[in-house]
Amino acid sequence: MNPKAHDAHSSSSPESGPATPSDEWTREELEGVRRRDPQALERFFERTFDSIYGLSFRLLSDRTAAEDATQEVFLKVHRAAHRIDPQRDPTPWILTITTNVCRDLFRSSGHKMSKASVSIDEEPELGASLVRETSTPEAELLQKEQQSQVQAAIGRLPEALREVIVLHDYQGLGHQEIAEIVKVSYGAVRKRYSRALSALGEILEEIADE
């Protein structure tokens, strides 16, 4: 399957809430992926596409770059399929590959932070809140605008801060899970997350004034 040909908005969009691979994987399905069975791989890609593309978009803030990242992730999954443990949930493995691919793509493309410059080592201030969800129809337009502003602000964060905020608030991962994915300590993830929230608040104020 060519990931770029997949309709990225058929079941979810990067602007929507957390997107994660299906909760249940059977041993037979993962055995098929490990053997690189074409049908098993096709089903695997279909079930993980939204999560991979959504995470890539959040980390890169660019649809074309997210498509490129998604395609690269699938290539890496195919090459490393023999390493899958049929008895374990492959989700952490998938998210780790995606995060690393986006990190490499971001660095190789020469992306630079715009306007906001935040040190990941600074002590966190009082955290700012992300967009609060609302079920009132009257607030939908405002909520969409806020979501767009939050994504723009996330795109201005340093790579290390952007990763933890996206993995925590959009992928629903805990700090320990994030630590295992980005290869840092639990304490470092907590510090980065607190700093990311504070930085987002500052950047959102800048965006509101533009």
Image (cartoon, rainbow, N blue to C red):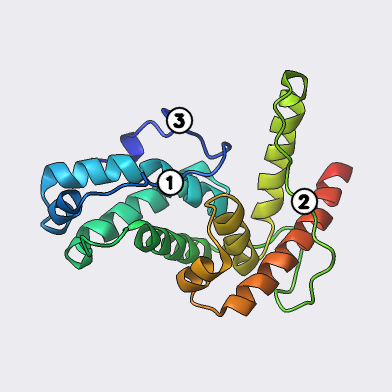
Residue 51 numbered mark, or none: 1
139 sits to left or right of 100: right
Q: Position of residue 188 (x, y in %)?
A: 63, 77
Residue at (73, 48) in percent of width and height:
130
Mark 1 and mark 3: span between their CA atoms? 12 Å
Lower position in the chain sequence, tag 2 or tag 1: 1
151 sits to left or right of 93: right
**Residue farthest along the top direction in this orientation:** 137
Given the image, on which type of amino acid does mark 2 rest? Ser
Residue 9 numbered mark, or none: 3
Q: Quadrant of the C terminus?
A: top right
Q: Residue at label 2? A: 129
Q: Nearer the viewer, mark 2 or mark 1?
A: 2
Residue 163 visible from this viewpoint: yes
182 sits to left or right of 125: left
Where 5 sits versus 193, above or below? above
